[in-house]
Image (tube, grey):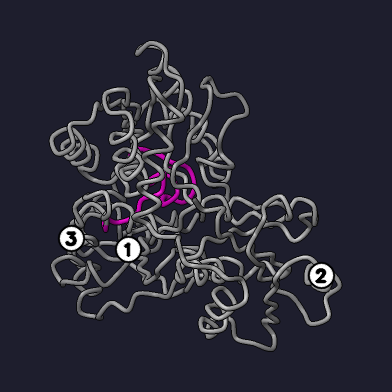
C-alpha cells in the first residue's frame, strides 16, 4: 500500500528530515527518509511520486535529482520549513499527482492482512513491554494469527511501580491474549552490574531481552518469528545510512548479531508515535491504554544515571509514581505527552530532621510533542511542581532535592540517556 504513493525525503542537513516526513504524512501521503548518498538507480527502484531534498541552493546533487524526479527543494536557511505545509500539500497533489491513500485505517487493515499471509500457521512470539507500541503490535498480531501468538512480558526490574501487574491484567483479562510473565530482575541487574555508559546499558538490555525470548521460545516448541514494537523514530535515532546516531535504541542498535528466530517482524517500523496511537484507536484499544505514558524498552535503566542498583531503582520508582500521580490529580495528564522522573546520580547537601543530609537529586521532565521527534517543554504550574517536590523529598528516602528540566528537543532528547 505505502509504495503506491511514496515521497522520498533526502536530507543534506540532518536536522529537518523527520519534520518534513511528518508534514508529508499529515497530508495522507507516505514518506520515507533516505540517505543523501542513495544512488539514482536505487531511488528509481523505489519508484517515488516525488522527492523533497533539504539542501543549499544550487546543490549539484539536487540538480541531478531534478532531471529524474519531481523535486521540491528546501533551503532551511532561506525558507522556514515549519511554515511550509501548504507548499508541501501543493507539491504532493498538484505536481506529483498523489491522491492521499495513506491512512491509519488502511494501514491497520493491510497490516492484519499482510501478517496473516506472511505468518500463516506458524508460531509467533511478541515482546510486550506494556507501552503503546508493543500493545498495538500485540493486538494487530492477535487479529492476524489468534492463538498462534504468545506475548512475553519480561519484568527486568526496570519497570515502573505496579506496571507489570497492570499490563498482565489488561492483556490477559481484556484481550484474552496468551501471556507469559518472566521475573528476571536478578538476571538483568547482574548483567548490568558496574555498567555506567548509557549505550552499553542499552546494548546489554537489548541482548538480554533476546536471550530471554529465545529461551522461552524453546520451552514453547517451534517459534518461527519474534515481533517487537520498533517504530520509525527508533530507526532514525539509531542512525539511517550515514546519519549520526543520537542513541542506539535497545530494539535496533542494541540487538545482538545472532538471533535464534527465522525473522524479527516489526509491524510498526514505518510509523511515528502519533500514527501508532491512531492505529491503536482504529483497532479499538481503549484511549486510556493508547495514550498511556510512553516508556522506553530499557525502562528505568535509562532514567537512573550511572550504575544500576535495586536501591536506586526503587527510589526512582517511588519518586516517579508520586510525580505521575500529582500530574493526574492536577488534570494535566492529557495536556502533557510525556512526563517522568530521573535519578540523576548527583548528591547534594541538605537538612532533614534538623541534621545534615547528603542525598540524591531527582529531576522531573515533561514535554509536549506530536511525533516525539521534536518536543517543547511542558509548562507545569509552580504550585503543582512545589507539591511534587515536597512529597518526593518527604516521602522518598534518599532524595534531598528536586529540579525541573526545561530543555526542548532538540537540543536535548526526551530521555536523559
In this rendering, the answer to whether 200 lies above or below 75 is: above
Q: What separation in Å lies between label 1 and label 3 (alpha carbons)?
A: 11 Å
Residue lying furthest bottom in this view?
78
Q: Which residues are magenta?
A: 291-310
Q: Is residue 3 magenta?
A: no
Q: Is residue 82 left or right of residue 176?
A: right
Front disc: 2 or 1: 2
- In the picture, the disc for residue 325 is 3
Q: Neighbour class for label 3 at 10 Å: few (<14), some, many (≥20)?
A: few
Residue found at x 47% / y 45%: 230
Q: Which residue is mark 1?
A: 339
Above or below, 221 against 288 in this view is above
Q: Is residue 81 left or right of residue 180?
A: right
Name the residue that disc number 2 marks: 67
Give the CA separation, mark 2 to mark 1. Answer: 47 Å
- Separation of disc 2 and disc 3 at Cα? 57 Å
N-terminal of the two: label 2 or label 3?
2
The residue positioned 31% from the left and 59% from the top of the image is 357
Label 1 Cα crowd, 10 Å radius (few <14 / some 14-19 / many 20+) = many
Relative image position of residue 250 (x, y in whole percent): 51, 41
Corner quadrant of residue 218: top left
Residue in the picture at 32% in, 26% down: 149
Amino acid at each position: 500500500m505505502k509504495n503506491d504513493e511514496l515521497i522520498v525525503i533526502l536530507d543534506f542537513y540532518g536536522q529537518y528530515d523527520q519534520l518534513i516526513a511528518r508534514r508529508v504524512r499529515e497530508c495522507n501521503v507516505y514518506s520515507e527518509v533516505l540517505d543523501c548518498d542513495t544512488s539514482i538507480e536505487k531511488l528509481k527502484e523505489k519508484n517515488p511520486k516525488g522527492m523533497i531534498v533539504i539542501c543549499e541552493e544550487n546543490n549539484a546533487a539536487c540538480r541531478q535529482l531534478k532531471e529524474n524526479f519531481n523535486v521540491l527543494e528546501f533551503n532551511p536557511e532561506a525558507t522556514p520549513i515549519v511554515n511550509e505545509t501548504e507548499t508541501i500539500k501543493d507539491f504532493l497533489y498538484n505536481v506529483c499527482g498523489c491522491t492521499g491513500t495513506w491512512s491509519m485505517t488502511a494501514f491497520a487493515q493491510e497490516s492484519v492482512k499482510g501478517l496473516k499471509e506472511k505468518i500463516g500457521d506458524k508460531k509467533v512470539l511478541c515482546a510486550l513491554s506494556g507501552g503503546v507500541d508493543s500493545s498495538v503490535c500485540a493486538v494487530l498480531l492477535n487479529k492476524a494469527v489468534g492463538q498462534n501468538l504468545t506475548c512475553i512480558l519480561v519484568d527486568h526490574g526496570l519497570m515502573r511501580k505496579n506496571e507489570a501487574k497492570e499490563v498482565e491484567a489488561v492483556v490477559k483479562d481484556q484481550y484474552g491474549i496468551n501471556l507469559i510473565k518472566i521475573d528476571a530482575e536478578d538476571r538483568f541487574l547482574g548483567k548490568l552490574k558496574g555498567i555506567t555508559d548509557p549505550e552499553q546499558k542499552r546494548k546489554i538490555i537489548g541482548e538480554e531481552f533476546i536471550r530471554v525470548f529465545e529461551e522461552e521460545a524453546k520451552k514453547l516448541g517451534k517459534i518461527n518469528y519474534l515481533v517487537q514494537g520498533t517504530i520509525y523514530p527508533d530507526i532514525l535515532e539509531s542512525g539511517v545510512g550515514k546519519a549520526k546516531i543520537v542513541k542506539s535504541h535497545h530494539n535496533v542498535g542494541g540487538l545482538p548479531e545472532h538471533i535464534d528466530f527465522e525473522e524479527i517482524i516489526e509491524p510498526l517500523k514505518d510509523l511515528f508515535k502519533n500514527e501508532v496511537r491512531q492505529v491503536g484507536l482504529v483497532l479499538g484499544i481503549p484511549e486510556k491504554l493508547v495514550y498511556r505514558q510512553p516508556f522506553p524498552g530499557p525502562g528505568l535503566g535509562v532514567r537512573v544515571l550511572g550504575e544500576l542498583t535495586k536501591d536506586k531503582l526503587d527510589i526512582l520508582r517511588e519518586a516517579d509514581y508520586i510525580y505521575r500521580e500529582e500530574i493526574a490529580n492536577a488534570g494535566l495528564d492529557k495536556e502533557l505527552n510525556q512526563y517522568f522522573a530521573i535519578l540523576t546520580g548527583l548528591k547534594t547537601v541538605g537538612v532533614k530532621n534538623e541534621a545534615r543530609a547528603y542525598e540524591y537529586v531527582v529531576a522531573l521532565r515533561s514535554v509536549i510533542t506530536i511525533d516525539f521527534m521534536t518536543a517543547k517543554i511542558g509548562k507545569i504550574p509552580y504550585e503543582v511542581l512545589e507539591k511534587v517536590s515536597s512529597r518526593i523529598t518527604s516521602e522518598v528516602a534518599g532524595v534531598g532535592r528536586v529540579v525541573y528540566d526545561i530543555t526542548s528537543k532538540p537540543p536535548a532528547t526526551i530521555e536523559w540517556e
